[in-house]
Image (cartoon, rainbow, N blue to C red):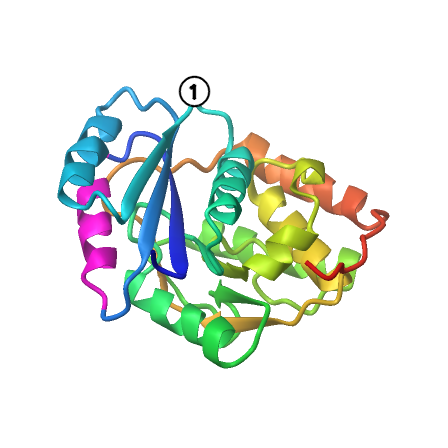
Amino acid sequence: MNDSIVIIPTFNEKENIEAIIRKVFSLEKSFDILIIEDNSPDGTAAIIKRLIKEFPEHLFIEERKGKLGLGTAYIHGFKWALAKDYKYIFEMDADFSHNPEDLLRLYDATANKGYDAAIGSRYITGVNVVNWPMGRVLMSYYASAYVRLVTGLSIRDTTAGFMCYTAKVLRNIDLDKIKFTGYAFQIEMKYTAVKMGFNIVEVPIIFTDRTLGESKMSGSIFKEAIIGVLKLRFKKAPTISDN
């Protein structure tokens, strides 16, 4: 078994899923992949199951009954990965907005440089976003600024969804108490890890908006992030155990 697993949530990703799986498996370091599939009506699951026959020891699927939210998908994946004793657990989108090649850099930051978690950051060296309309770039950038202002976090890309967590971080966070589901989930995880004293690094990446399939962004997800940050400000963080 590999020491690393990439968790990819999917809903209607038939245009991207085979290509992203094959790209990850082509990297010089070996990663396993866990797909959290939310009952896509477009046949995404069937493509994954066909590929499992080709990669039976490295590709896995967990199917859920419907579209239950990004946060719950990752929590499901985290628990699955911890039960299998993976040491490095990654979050990544299915649509190539995150370059799979950057998995190697996130792995290096945690496995070799000693960080507890690594963020694939769009904003640590400026604004590194391709194919987004200016309005969305500004919304995302200033949302992170708002999070820093309210929470005191120094992280530049607080809503980033390209991550590597060590198992130590995920075993210490009470995953059942992570309640947000959209971008607020990403903020809550980072906030909790920082407040617990974990050492997190931002690794600069270039984020490229999807060219195939439909974005899952919505106004309700953005609203949850704005309101959720205010709740996080007064959340008491747990302490690190010896796990």
Residue at image coords 44%, 24%: 67
Residue 226, percent from left and from top: 68, 43
Say whether residue 144 is visible: yes
Give the crowd class for mark 1: few <14, some 14-19, many >=20 residues within 10 Å. Answer: few
Q: Is residue 58 above or below residue 156?
A: above
Q: Between residues 75 and 204, which one lies in front from this camera angle? A: 75
Residue 111, percent from left and from top: 47, 73
* Quarter of the C terminus within the rendering: bottom right
- Residue position marked by numbered label 1 in the rendering: 66
Is-magenta flag for residue 22? yes
Magenta residues span 14-27
Say whether residue 126 is visible: no
Q: Between residues 17 and 207, which one lies in front from this camera angle? A: 17
Is-magenta flag for residue 124? no
Query: Judging from the image, what secondary structure is the residue with disc 1 in?
Result: loop
The answer to which image quadrant residue 195 occupies is bottom right
Residue 83, percent from left and from top: 51, 44
* Quarter of the N terminus within the rendering: bottom left
Left or right: residue 26 versus residue 89 is left
Which secondary structure dominates the residues rendered in magenta?
helix
Left or right: residue 186 versus residue 128 is right
Residue at image coords 63%, 52%: 171
Residue 65, percent from left and from top: 42, 18
Callout 1 amino acid: Gly
Q: Between residues 25 and 134, which one lies in front from this camera angle? A: 25
Residue at image coords 68%, 67%: 198
Residue at image coords 27%, 35%: 13
Left or right: residue 202 versus residue 195 is left
